[in-house]
Amino acid sequence: MKNLRLLFLLTFIHLLGYSQSSKTVTIGILADKSSEETKPLLAKLQNEIKAVVGQSATIVFKEVLENGFNNELAKSNYQTLVNSNADIILVFGVVNTIMIDEVDEYSKPIILFGSANSDFYDFDEDQKTSTVNNINYLIAPFSYTDDLDVFKSLYNYKKVGIIIDDFLPGILPVKNLFNNYFSKNGGSYTLIPLQKDGSITSDLNDIDAVYLAGGFYLNDNEFKTLVTTINSKKLPSFSVYSKEDVEKGILASNQPETNIDQFFRRIALNVEAIIEGTNASTLPIYLNYKKKLSINYNTAKQIGFPLRYSMLAKADFIGGENDVKVGTSYSIIDIMKGVVAKNLSLDVERKNIELSSQDVKTAKSSYLPNITANGNGVYLDPKVAEISNGTNPEFSTSGNVTLEQVIYSEGAGANITINENLQKAQKETYNAAELDALLNASVAYFNALVLKTNVAIQNQNLQVTKKNLEIADQNFAAGESGKSDVLRFRSQLAQNTQSLINAENQKLQAFNTINQLMNNPIATEIDIDDAKISEGIFENYKYQDFLEILDDPKLRPALVKFLVEEGNKNAPELKNIGYNMEATQRNYRLNNLGRFVPVVALQGQYNLAISQSGKGTIVPEGFPNAPDGTYNVGVNLSLPIFQQNQRNINRQTAKIQEDQLLVQKENVELSIEKNVNDILLDMTNQIANIEISKVSEETAKESLDLTQNAYAQGAVPLIQLIDAQTNYLQAQLARATANYDYLLTSMQLERAIGYFFLMNTEANNQDFIQRANQYILNNN
């Protein structure tokens, strides 16, 4: 019998609970307008209300009634819900806010979250609830005047264009608000109506800044068009809404990321309270959150807005979706090709090649004829002229032309050969300089990438510090920690800000180096594209194949041997030594047996008596008249017998130079072999570093998140949170640099073997890979 009673009691309790949970609450919703972007938010709100209310009631939502910004339709929609079975009414939008404010009595509980600005609410400072039966206002800290103050501190505008929904001035006293504000604070404004399709009628030419006070209902394409119009005019812009507007290209906003979760949770909690019997008039009306200034640095660069270092501590800098490039963005190939084409040091080396070509021309000119023309005018003592029988007149002019032509000269031939080899050696000197310049370009590129990444990571670290400071402030306000934690994080904030400034300056210095290498004006604004292993341009050049071979101890020795052979074959330093060796050997032969080979030359001269006058011009009778023109031709052979022993000395010098070049060749070959082995070992280490740094960063991030939560709950001390943040910063830097270090070391390997994949065609690269694979296969 007791068991039956117990069973009956349990059944009653269950049925009672079921009857309570089966209580149905119908919620009606009024809105000004919906869009594809707001529909997911409605579903999120409905789910949040159901989750908070739980099993205490069954929630039914009526169809959303929209007024399309029409006040009469807003009144009609409201009466429809009042006359319906709706138990609670949720009201959204400016038009609905105005309409609800005009209602005298509220027969059903209402929760109002309007878009009207807090500047238009006239509540007592101590008022925390609506105090009006059945209505609860939810007021977020949006303020036109506060925004204009922050905007003014950011940019000292003279005349600001305020973009506002075209229907708003007809239902809110916005003109009175702005007239009063600017009369007190200086400057001027103009209202720019925003049409429902996102278009504006103003050309924006008579203003120097834009304040976006409307556009909440614009879709993504309409908003993007509006932002593009503003930024194309190079106008600083400020949004009344959230950080998301900044991410989409607006310059700045003083609102944090959308607090939609906070809004929806408050609405859901108020719905739950009303269901449980609480009058809406007693519910809190203010939604408080901390404002945060956000600046889009891409937009700032695009419009030429000056970013001051003083902004770093109080603003969040974000990139956002505004990916308009400022200046030129270079890939590593762009930089390498630019260096080859325009680098000044390489231009100097190219001039050296031209100079060596001139030396070859000079050497070859020894076999060209040497023609000399002479003219003479003579005045002779009349006494001597008179007795010369007409052969030496008192006044005479004459001329002659002399021809000298070398037919064969061992010295001239040797000089031509020597200078031709020296010219080829100079070309190899240039090739070596070009390879060095390409490596320097790679080093500059990856160094700039590291520093660019460091800027982003230092900025993230600064944001983490700001978050930690907020947690410390909250803990201090709640009495869970002392003032020292807040002061410590403020000090940390200053240090992180300085680190970010240093990182930005170092990045700009790296960009200056790239500009110098490419012979750009140093002040040229540039950016660089990112580089990742096996992605983009590095995917096409099969670096992954080398990584796999390096990871196999059986294949690595054959790879080393192949690369050493390639290095010896391609090395311009060895080719330079080879050409210098040929020049030295030719010089040795000249000063050895070549000294016994005579120089054969042809000589000829033509003489012409141009004029004669004065005494001695008459030839006595019986004496022959000398012809006016005479010539002579001859062949000359010359053989130096003894030239102060210079030939023997030159021969000995050439032999010493040859021995020196052999030593240099051996040293270069040894250096190539050592460099290849060392670089491959470095690459092996870096393969491990890439994987280890990835795990390390993920672990450090998880540890930081856990430590932040634990610190917020007072479970861990301040120093543990700082250590976790520092570890995460170091792990991020390590992972970023591991990728770049591997790619840079790959470029160093290519310099060691004298072959840059990025500067060769795909066909050449495939041929190189095939030869490497075949060589490794043949040696295993």
Image (cartoon, grey):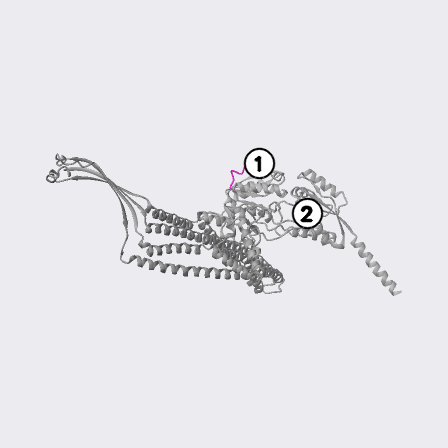
Kindly indicate whether the residue at mark 1 contacts the one at mark 2 (C-beta within 8 angstroms): no
Q: Which residue is mark 2?
A: 40
Left or right, 148 with reference to 574: right
Label 2, residues with CA under 10 Å away: few <14, some 14-19, many ≥20: few
Q: Tell me the quarter of the image containing the N terminus.
A: bottom right
Kind of residue at disc 2: Pro
The foreground one among 444 and 764 is: 764
- The reply to whether residue 572 is in sight is yes
Residue 336 drawn at (x, y percent): 48, 50
Indicate which label's residue lies in the foreground, 2 or 1: 2
Q: Residue furthest front?
A: 622
Residue at image coords 46%, 55%: 571
Count of residue discs: 2
Residue at image coords 41%, 56%: 577
User: From which residue to which does the magenta span run?
Assistant: 199-208
The foreground one among 63 and 411 is: 411
Q: Quadrant of residue 773?
A: bottom right
Q: Main secondary structure of the magenta part?
A: loop
C-alpha separation, residue under disc 2 versus residue under disc 1: 31 Å
The foreground one among 152 and 348 is: 348
- The reply to whether residue 494 is in sight is no
Residue 208 drawn at (x, y percent): 51, 41
Q: Which residue is mark 1?
A: 201
Left or right, 600 with reference to 229: left
Left or right, 738 with reference to 66: left
Question: Counting residues from the N terminus, which is met first, the one under dot 2 or under dot 1?
Answer: 2
Q: Residue furthest right?
A: 1
